[in-house]
Image (cartoon, rainbow, N blue to C red):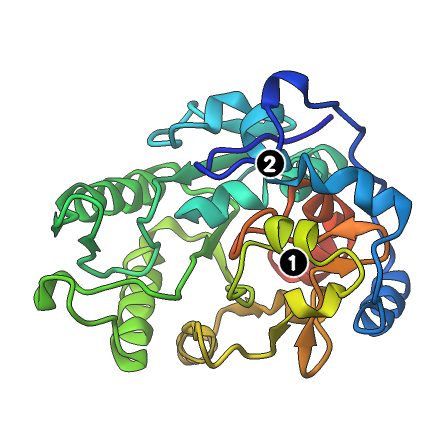
Amino acid sequence: MLCAAVGTLVIASTATATAPKLPSAGTASQIARLVAASVNIKTLSPTVLNKVGNAFNDNAAVDYPKTKNGCPALRTCDFGDTKSSKKIVIMGDSHAQMWIPALNRIGNALKLKVIVLYMAQCPAASLDVWLSIYNKSYTACSQQRTAWIATLNKIHPLTVLLTDHTNGVHSAASSGTQPFTSAEWQAGLQTTIAELKPSKAKLAVIGDPVTFDTEPPICLANNQSEVQKCDALTPNPDRPGQQVAERAAANAAKVLYVDPTKWLCTATTCSPVVGNYIVFYDSFHISCTYAAFLSGVLQASLKKVL
């Protein structure tokens, strides 16, 4: 099954898209070996080349169509063992949607209901965001986040996972002229964690992956024999995120921090291709296929809170 595109850029029409099965979970050693070798990939293999034209469609909107326009409330987007009384929640922006292929498997394996709460461009961190597309304060985001926290404090899930895209998020206080500082992001995430204390849930933060300078599918289509022209640095100084602030907030609040970087990148470089997988379907979202491939290592990393 393929997960389809919600972005505006496309290489192939979704109407003609094929629907390959999601891969089995990779082992930690297998993923480490493939990531280490990924920076030496120069030319697209025939297998990967066949995927490039449809790579923008490899996200969660087709396999999980109910998530296409967000997951604003309980029972809107339930996955895993939906009949289970044990609930885990992932809350945040589109990165919460991004991890569904992995969490759906984890929920089924451990007999957990997986509840997704996400709103596009609305971080789990308690921050007043500027919505640049409409040139206004994103008040709906702040209101939605407050409602989510109140709901979770009532239903007492087993686990709450917080995850965000952190590059280029601008502050409403600056009318969108300035991104949040690291101190502001850390404080905002710590506020959310503190406000979730009445839920009695085990908490974890899944860190933000590196953001690429280009859209990998487009770059790969144009550089089939020079794959590493499409890579990103680890971390990427041109499109920095708030990964340090996320870790600092988790450490200060004494909650688990899961860093996905080692599953995607070497210590210095993120290749757009790992093994026979196109890792990102756009510049800052892991592909549905690769997220499924990471389900085993994500489950192991979350063991303390599941």
Q: Secondary structure at mark 1?
A: loop
Q: Classify 10 Å Cα crowding around label 1: few (below 14), some (14-19), many (20 and above).
A: some
Which residue appears at 42% of the width and 23% of the height?
76
Please say if the residues under marks 1 and 2 sit with CB atoms less than 8 Å apart: no
Which residue appears at 78% of the width and 34% of the height?
22
Which residue appears at 45% of the width and 77% of the height?
238
Q: According to the image, label 1 marks what residue?
A: 302
Q: Quadrant of residue 140?
A: top left
Q: Is residue 82 visible?
A: no
Q: Is residue 227 left or right of residue 258?
A: right
Furthest toward the top, the residue is 15
Q: According to the image, label 2 marks what residue?
A: 11
> Label for residue 191?
none
> Residue 41: image x %, image y %?
84, 66
Q: Quadrant of residue 154?
A: top left
> Residue 134: image x %, image y %?
16, 43
Q: Nearer the viewer, residue 213 or 147?
A: 213
